[in-house]
């Protein structure tokens, strides 16, 4: 070690900063080992200039013997050979010796350093006890040798002389002095670095600033800055070293870019020289001295410079443990170099760059593999895969260039080219000669033969693909696969197809139509090569319908299919293809639109097919297979209505385009929603409870979209496994020509058997080729039904009015029954609704399509029991219509005959009348029973008639005179003329009813009422009960007299005669002429009995005072509802009236008028008072009860109170009747009972009296605002 | 300027793709489609970090020898891809960003059109114009 070489070898990168040693070499040699060991042991902090962060560094040094030549000459920029520190060693302790020899030598050394203006030196004086002992006599007590040296050399720099004591002894003192020495050395070294590097950097910067000057050369500058990088590397500061190279890289890149922008630098000329060598990157050496020399000489090509720069960067990055940055930078570099060569317009042999890139990629990968373990490599595929793929690419293009992928093998031209390319590679580098797998060998081998090329290419491709897969870049993997498929196509189309299929699946599922088309074309080529006819035809069909291709190409593929179809007649070899690629079913329309016909009728289905072929195609047969289903709901024609809603006549097929583009967007968005509106209505009044929207195809919409399996079968290139179901029934059309675009084809659907027919599959046969649509979706059905004959009767006009002749319409749907001549309908006659005979009764026969088929007259024969209508002959599924006139007889008077109530809801003989919620008219249901020839059962039909009138009656009194008023209200919507209004009484002969009506005929408009009045006169006793019948004739206005129909109204009146008269008078206060507001007046009420006691009355009341004169108790009550009067004192009281005519009773009551003006009299009510003892006396009289009840129903004269009272009394009556006659007091209470209308006549009813204001000067308050 | 501009739906089918008419359209389809690999990688990498404010610009997706492919993804996962010729060295990152921003704005306008059905391919003339503006070299 002590003998250092003259020139240090720098490419080993084992460099250390140089430290020279002068003086006693023997001494140094003895200390060298421990010095070299101990110097790097502890780090030192290196403070840097320019604000760079301080760093801790371990210092090492290369100690060399001092020579004058080592000192750098002026202008020498070399840094690596620069001695950073000079040491002078001495162990002299003898003053004499020092003076005589050592000082002299030291001075020479010092002077030569000064001559080179080197200030980094130190003198080390080694003291040992041995030396001290040896020269004991000469020891100067006061100043040592050290002091002398210091005074001689260290001019104010005492630290430049260091003492090392007993270095070879193992003592604490020795250790201490070692440490001091090491620290000193480190400090001095760092000082030297800072100073010298700083100076160097300054020089470098100055040089860089001169780059715009004409003579500036990048290569020179490169060497200078690289020197700095070397030093940093030497100091283990790789980061700083890398920065130097990156700066150089950026500077160079900028120059190239400027060149591109037209700013040419002279020195760039050398880089523009044609590329002669493309040996690739060389990363195995720390420094590629060949290239470096080339750069130094200015002879390097662009590739050389880039290669060298990158190799240095790579080395440093690997030192920094950043291998993945190497791969990333490598890819950038390779791309960049290719661009730069293009930009600089450097002429390159075709393929040379490919070689260079290929070699470089592999070299980088090898380098990385060399410094990482396999697990690490596998985990970082994402960083290396780009290089793999790039290398694969380049090898492929080289293979193409050199004719290695053509089927015939390389031509001589190709071979020449290969030789040229190989020549540019030069010889293999010594580093890799021994390696079997060097990139150089690989390339050479690959280019040498077709087989070797294939082997290498496949190896690379698969490696790249595997890596892409591993990191989840499937699209990239497929692209590599596709490129691989192109290669396989030459020899192994089967494998090629697998790759292509995978690729096309991915493109289809993501909707990239152009790649799909392109890949499919390749697939078609593959399949043709493989002779897979069916697949090829399927793909051809897809391509023929592909809008991305030119018409020419599409025609070509279409022709391929047609040629095959026409080729042979070998029936065994039929090819089934998917319909979707050939044409699309867009619409299906049924005629008639209901898609529902009776059996045997004609049903047409019009199919709209969008043909995707570019030319018109002649089809031998187009067929739709049908699935037949026996109708589940039976043959009832009524069910048709429900199915009609779900079975519209026109079905639109929303189909995805088989060409990939929009298909995927549809697939992504899912199928269109099929929405239906639902309404929930209350069953009672049909009001809307809730409404909503229902999605019918949730199972499709909500389905998870699997990217793996595209939903559209058309995208599968291999046709789906089609099973041609040979349905028994088919829709067929022969010889159709489908033009490109929409075609409409009409089928006649079979409609023999009743049931549901579902269209299942669609076939189009072209020679040997059959296109099949395996499922028609949404499913299309039509229905063939068989219908029972049906008879309906409905009013011609609503509503049917009772009492007038009305026309009803008979509709007979013949269904499957053919009406023969002589068939007749037998209507059972009812007396409440006779059928009116008419002269001619025409019947219309219409076909199912509502066309008139025929018209003929019906003959109607009526016997006592039945009316027979003989029908004309009518074919099945036709409609027969005719009208009949019927009359519904209005039931007399109030309904509910007495017996009906007793039978308690048994079947009534009379038609029931009831009030209808929709109309104010009273309704009557009439039933008809019809015997039909096609059935052994009678058909029961109901008709609803409405009574157009409502009748009310009332009794009016004037003293003893009585009047009966009948109010007839027209509740219908039509006007009537009324004539001959009459009122008759059945029981009393002597009763006279005098009509006070003036007109005999009267118009009664709709919603109006007519009042008729009769005075009742009797000869002797007034009748207690009257049975009256009101009758009138009515007809619609302006009709003949003969058309008048009778109307009857029966009613019953009871207790008609007046029993009491009430007369009231208001007496002004004493001395006043008139009543005055606020003053008490007298109200005198006089109740007079008008008649003797009648039978009923006697029965009711007389029991109490059997012995005395017959009297009854009345209660009067004065009530003023309008608050005009204040009743003072008693307002009501009891009066006992003798039951004799003209018996009278007077009552006086004090009242006070509260207002001035004409005030109506206060109301005076008179009521029957029944004391509690009298309650039991009421005779249980069912008749009277019934009368009571019926009265309340007739004119509502009695309120509910009365009604329930009578019922209660009846209940008590029963209990009494079962026991003895003894009254049961506990049950009955005294009660009041009102008189019937007309029994009490009030003379002063509505009479008024004048009331004066209280005083004349009363104050009127007027509020004005 | 750009040689190819593509808008890709969330489900990875193209909503819009246009390349310079002089160039091989198919090649760009392949390039853009493959770039989705890297887009997905970048999106999922972003998803892992908690960073709320997501950077829409994905930067350089990958360089090829001839082209540089840049990516951008909207919040609704619609992807924009711009392919630039590698020889076009004058384009800076900032300019690419501003192109994406312009594209995004125009895309938003398209989406605001009530007659546009989200998920359909873009047929807006205005959008076409903006894209053309980015593809034509300036001057």
Image: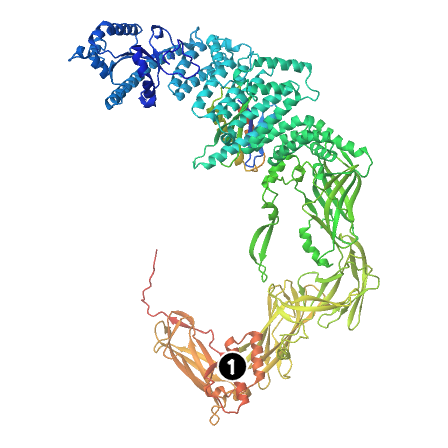
Q: Which residue is mark 1?
A: A1208
Residue displayed at 45% across by 32% down: B55
Q: Quadrant of the N terminus of chain A?
A: top left
Residue A681 in the image, given as x and y percentages of width and height: 58, 58
Is there any visible trace of residue B29 in the rendered image? no
Q: Position of residue A220 (x, y in %)?
A: 43, 9
**Residue A454 pos. (x, y %):** 64, 24
Horizontal side of residue A19 vs A712, given as left or right: left
Residue A107: give x, y in percent of width and height: 26, 6
The one of A596 and A871 positioned closer to us in this rendering: A596
Q: The C terminus of chain A is located in which quarter?
A: bottom left
Q: Name the foreground residue: A261 vs A338.
A: A338
User: Foreground residue, A864 or A221?
Assistant: A221
> In this view of the protein, can residue A409 be seen by the observer?
yes
Q: Is residue A1013 above or below residue A1025?
A: above
Name the outermost residue toward the left: A142
Asked if A296 appears above or below A634 in the picture, the reply is: above
Vertical order, A761 against A1160 (above or below): above
Displayed quadrant of residue A38: top left
A1250 horizontally vs A461: left or right: left
């Amino acid at each position: 070690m002590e003998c250092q070489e003259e020139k240090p070898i720098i490419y080993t990168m084992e460099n250390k900063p140089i430290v020279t040693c002068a003086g006693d070499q023997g001494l140094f040699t003895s200390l060298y080992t421990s010095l070299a060991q101990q110097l790097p042991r502890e780090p030192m902090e290196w403070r840097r200039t320019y604000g760079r962060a301080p760093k801790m560094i371990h210092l090492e040094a290369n100690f060399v013997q001092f020579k004058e030549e080592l000192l750098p000459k002026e202008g020498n920029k070399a840094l690596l050979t620069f001695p950073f520190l000079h040491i002078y060693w001495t162990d002299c302790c003898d003053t004499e010796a020092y003076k005589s020899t050592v000082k002299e030598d030291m001075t020479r050394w010092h002077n030569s350093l000064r001559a080179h203006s080197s200030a980094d030196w130190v003198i080390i004086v080694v003291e040992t006890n041995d030396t001290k002992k040896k020269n004991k006599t000469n020891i100067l007590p006061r100043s040592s040798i050290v002091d002398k040296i210091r005074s001689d050399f260290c001019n104010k720099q005492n630290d430049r002389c260091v003492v090392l004591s007993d270095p070879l002894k193992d003592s604490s003192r020795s250790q201490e002095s070692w440490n001091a020495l090491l620290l000193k050395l480190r400090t001095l070294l760092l000082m030297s670095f800072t100073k010298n590097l700083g100076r160097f950097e300054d020089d470098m910067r100055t040089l860089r600033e001169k780059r715009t000057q004409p003579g500036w050369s990048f290569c020179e500058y490169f060497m200078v800055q690289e020197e700095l990088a070397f030093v940093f590397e030497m100091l283990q500061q790789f980061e700083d070293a890398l920065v130097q190279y990156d700066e150089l890289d950026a500077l160079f890149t900028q120059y190239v870019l400027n060149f591109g922008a037209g700013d040419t630098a002279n020195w760039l000329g050398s880089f523009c020289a044609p590329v002669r060598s493309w040996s690739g990157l060389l990363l195995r050496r720390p420094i590629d001295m060949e290239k470096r020399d080339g750069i130094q000489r200015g002879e390097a090509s662009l590739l050389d410079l880039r290669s060298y720069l990158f190799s240095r960067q790579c080395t440093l990055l690997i030192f920094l443990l950043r291998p993945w940055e190497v791969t990333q930078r490598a890819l950038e570099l390779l791309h960049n170099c290719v661009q730069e060569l293009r930009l600089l317009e450097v002429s390159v042999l075709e393929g040379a760059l490919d070689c260079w890139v290929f070699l470089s990629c592999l070299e980088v990968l090898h380098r990385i593999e060399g410094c990482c373990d396999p697990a690490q490599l596998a985990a970082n595929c994402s960083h290396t895969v780009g290089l793999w793929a790039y290398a694969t690419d380049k090898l492929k293009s080289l293979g193409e260039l050199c004719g290695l992928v053509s089927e015939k093998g390389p031509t001589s031209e190709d071979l020449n080219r290969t030789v040229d390319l190989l020549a540019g590679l030069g010889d293999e580098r010594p580093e890799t000669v021994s390696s079997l797998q060097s990139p150089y060998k690989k390339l050479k081998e690959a280019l040498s033969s077709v087989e070797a090329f294939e082997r290498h290419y496949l190896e690379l491709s698969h490696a790249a693909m595997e890596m892409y897969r591993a990191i989840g870049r499937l699209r990239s993997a497929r692209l590599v696969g596709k490129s691989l498929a192109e290669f396989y196509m030459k020899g192994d189309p089967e494998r090629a197809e697998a790759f292509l299929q995978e690729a096309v699946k991915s493109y289809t599922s993501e909707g990239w139509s152009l790649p799909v088309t392109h890949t499919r074309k390749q697939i078609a080529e593959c399949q043709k090569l493989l002779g897979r006819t069916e697949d090829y035809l399927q793909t051809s069909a897809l391509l023929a319908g592909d809008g991305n291709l030119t018409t020419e190409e599409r025609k070509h593929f279409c022709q391929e299919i047609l040629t095959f179809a026409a080729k042979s007649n070998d029936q065994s070899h039929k090819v089934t293809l998917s319909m979707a690629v050939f044409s699309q079913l867009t619409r299906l329309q049924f005629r008639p639109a209901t898609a529902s016909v009776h059996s045997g009728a004609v049903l047409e289905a019009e199919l709209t097919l969008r043909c995707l072929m570019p030319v018109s195609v002649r089809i031998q047969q187009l067929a739709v297979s049908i699935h037949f289903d026996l109708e589940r709901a039976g043959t009832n024609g009524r069910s048709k209505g429900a199915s009609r809603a779900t079975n519209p006549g026109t079905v639109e097929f929303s189909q995805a385009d088989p060409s990939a583009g929009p298909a995927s967007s549809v697939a992504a968005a899912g199928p269109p929603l099929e929405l239906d509106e639902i309404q929930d209505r209350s069953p009672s009044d049909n009001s809307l409870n809730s409404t909503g929207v229902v999605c019918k195809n949730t199972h499709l919409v909500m389905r998870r979209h699997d990217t793996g399996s595209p939903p559209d079968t058309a995208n599968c290139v291999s046709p789906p496994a089609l099973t041609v179901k040979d349905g028994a029934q088919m829709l067929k059309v022969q010889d159709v020509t489908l033009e490109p675009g929409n075609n409409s084809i009409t089928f006649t659907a079979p409609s023999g058997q009743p049931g549901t027919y579902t269209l299942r599959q669609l076939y189009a046969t072209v020679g040997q080729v059959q296109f099949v649509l395996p499922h028609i979706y949404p499913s299309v059905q039509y229905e063939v039904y068989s219908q029972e004959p049906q008879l309906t009767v409905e009013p011609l006009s609503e509503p049917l009015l009772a009492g007038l002749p009305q026309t009803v319409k008979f509709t007979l749907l013949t269904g499957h029954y053919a009406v023969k001549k002589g068939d007749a309908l037998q209507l059972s006659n009812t007396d409440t609704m006779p059928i009116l005979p008419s002269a001619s009764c025409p019947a219309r026969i219409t076909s199912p399509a509502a066309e008139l088929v025929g018209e003929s007259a019906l003959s109607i024969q009526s016997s006592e029991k039945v009316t027979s209508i003989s029908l004309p002959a009518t074919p099945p599924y036709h409609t027969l219509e005719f009208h009949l006139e019927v009359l519904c007889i209005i039931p007399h008077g109030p309904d509910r005959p007495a017996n009906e109530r007793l039978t308690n809801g048994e079947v009534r003989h009379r038609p029931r009348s009831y009030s209808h919620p929709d109309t104010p008219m009273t309704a009557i249901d009439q039933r008809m029973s019809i015997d039909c020839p096609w059935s052994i059962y009678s058909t029961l039909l109901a008709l609803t008639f409405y009574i157009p009138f409502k009748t009310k009656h009332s009794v009016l009194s004037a003293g003893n005179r009585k009047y009966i008023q009948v109010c007839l209200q027209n509740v219908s919507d039509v006007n009537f003329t009324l004539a001959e209004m009459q009122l008759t009484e059945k029981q009393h002969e002597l009763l006279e009813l005098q009509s006070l009506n003036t007109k005999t005929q009267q118009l009664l408009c709709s919603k109006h009422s007519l009042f008729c009045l009769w005075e009742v006169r009797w000869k002797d006793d007034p009748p207690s009960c009257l049975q009256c019948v009101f009758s009138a004739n009515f007809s619609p206005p302006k009709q003949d007299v003969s058309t008048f129909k009778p109307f009857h109204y029966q009613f019953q009146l009871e207790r008609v005669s007046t029993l009491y008269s009430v007369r009231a008078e208001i007496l002004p206060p004493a001395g006043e002429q008139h009543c005055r507001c606020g003053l008490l007046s007298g109200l005198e009420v006089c109740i007079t009995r008008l008649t003797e006691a009648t039978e009923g009355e006697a029965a009711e009341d007389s029991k109490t005072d059997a012995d005395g004169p017959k009297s009854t108790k009345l209660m009067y009550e004065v009530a003023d509802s309008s608050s005009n009067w204040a009743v003072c004192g008693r307002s009501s009281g009891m009066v006992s009236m003798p039951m004799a005519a003209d018996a009278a009773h007077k009552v006086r009551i004090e009242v006070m008028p509260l207002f001035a003006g004409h005030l109506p009299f206060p109301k005076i009510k008179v009521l029957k008072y029944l004391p509690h003892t009298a309650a039991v006396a009421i005779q249980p009289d069912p008749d009277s009860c019934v009368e009571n009840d019926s009265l309340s129903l007739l004119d509502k004269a009695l309120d509910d109170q009365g009604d329930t009272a009578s019922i209660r009394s009846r209940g008590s009556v029963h209990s009494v009747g079962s026991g003895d006659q003894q009254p049961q007091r506990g049950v009955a209470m005294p009660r009041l009972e009102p008189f019937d209308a007309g029994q009490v006549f009030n003379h002063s009813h509505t009479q008024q009296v004048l009331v004066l204001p209280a005083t004349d000067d009363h104050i009127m308050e007027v509020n004005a605002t | 300027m750009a040689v190819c501009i593509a808008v890709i739906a969330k489900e990875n089918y193209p909503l819009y793709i246009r390349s310079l008419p002089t160039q091989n359209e198919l090649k760009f389809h392949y390039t853009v489609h493959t770039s989705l690999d890297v887009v997905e990688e970048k999106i999922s990498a972003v998803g892992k970090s908690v960073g709320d404010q997501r950077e829409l610009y994905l930067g350089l997706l990958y360089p090829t020898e001839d082209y540089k492919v840049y990516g951008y993804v909207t919040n609704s996962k619609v992807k924009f891809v711009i392919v630039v010729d590698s020889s076009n060295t004058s384009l800076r990152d900032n300019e690419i960003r501003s192109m994406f921003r312009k594209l995004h704005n125009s895309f938003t306008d398209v989406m605001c059109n009530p007659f546009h059905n989200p998920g359909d391919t873009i047929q807006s003339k205005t959008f076409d114009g903006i894209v053309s503006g980015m593809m034509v070299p300036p001057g």
